[in-house]
Image: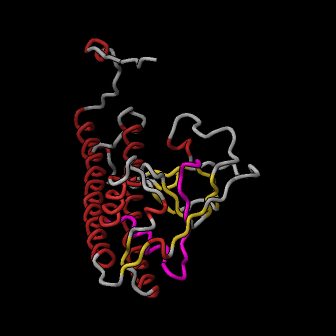
Amino acid sequence: MGSTRLEFSIHAVRDFLVALPPLPEQRRIAALLRTWDTAITAIEKLIAAKDRHYSCELSRLVSRDKSPRAHVGAFAEEVSARNRGGNEARVLSVTNSRGFVLPKDQFERRVASADLSNYKVVRRGQYAYNPSRINVGSIARLDGWSHGVLSPMYVVFRLDEAKVDSDFFLHWLSSHEARQRISNRAQGSVRETVSFSEFAELTIPLPATVQQTKIALYLNTLREEIKLLGQSVTALKTQKRGLMQKLLTGQWRLPMPDQETV
């Protein structure tokens, strides 16, 4: 079914009705909205700077660490539990930007099979990835739900947390080194996929677990700060949209200086 193109001519635009307050009030509205733009831009620049700082610290503390390297398979085990009873109906998928998501948040239509009995069960704290998309970052730890099911194509694995701190490992996964090693594995595969056995052959610098936890807590703090700043940007953008809706439609009017009481 072909897409429909919506076209507007200059004649159609001329027929639009626009709330048009006096020019001084228009200028005051524009100046007010610029205040929000300035704040949003400033925080976005701060986020970018803190992202760079996090990446540098991640490289310094994890990727360039001189501790002995260990194969992922030394502390990770594949999990293949199936939804045989069909009791679990929360179908999930893994994205490269938001981690685990519900399919309805990613797709406009149902993409899961009607029969979920062969789907893989994933539980909180376990990891999963799409073998054909792990090279673009589609790997994540389940944190947002207690459990769910994934398409049989996914690889699910768990960590032995007596050997590795899960947060430490999660940070390593987001490092340039990890992504490059995973990408190299995919390129070396005939179908550009990464099986668990291939993933398990990757190596990671692995200091003592106490040191892993210290590093992870520090990096968690950096990521949490970036997350909070991102929430601030989202809130400011929402506020600006609300102001635009009220001010540009004339629902709200700005008092002019000669109208203000002292």
Residue in the picture at 69% in, 41% down: 115
Q: Nearer the viewer, residue 12 or 53?
A: 53
Query: Bounds of the magenta span?
Result: 151-175
Image position of 168 with respect to 132: above or below: below
Image position of 53 with respect to 110: above or below: below
Residue in the picture at 43% in, 49% down: 132
Residue in the picture at 62% in, 48% down: 91
Image position of 248 with respect to 219: above or below: above
Quadrant of the rendered structure where residue 168 is? bottom left
Query: In what quadrant of the picture does the C terminus appear?
Result: bottom left
Image location (x, y in percent) of residue 248: 35, 34
Image location (x, y in percent) of residue 71: 42, 74
Q: Is residue 219 magenta?
A: no
Quadrant of the rendered structure where residue 19 is? top left
Image location (x, y in percent) of residue 239: 40, 49
Q: Is residue 156 magenta?
A: yes
Report the number of numbered marks.
0
User: Is residue 101 in view from this perspective?
Assistant: yes
Q: Is residue 96 left or right of residue 84?
A: left
Q: Is residue 56 left or right of residue 217?
A: left
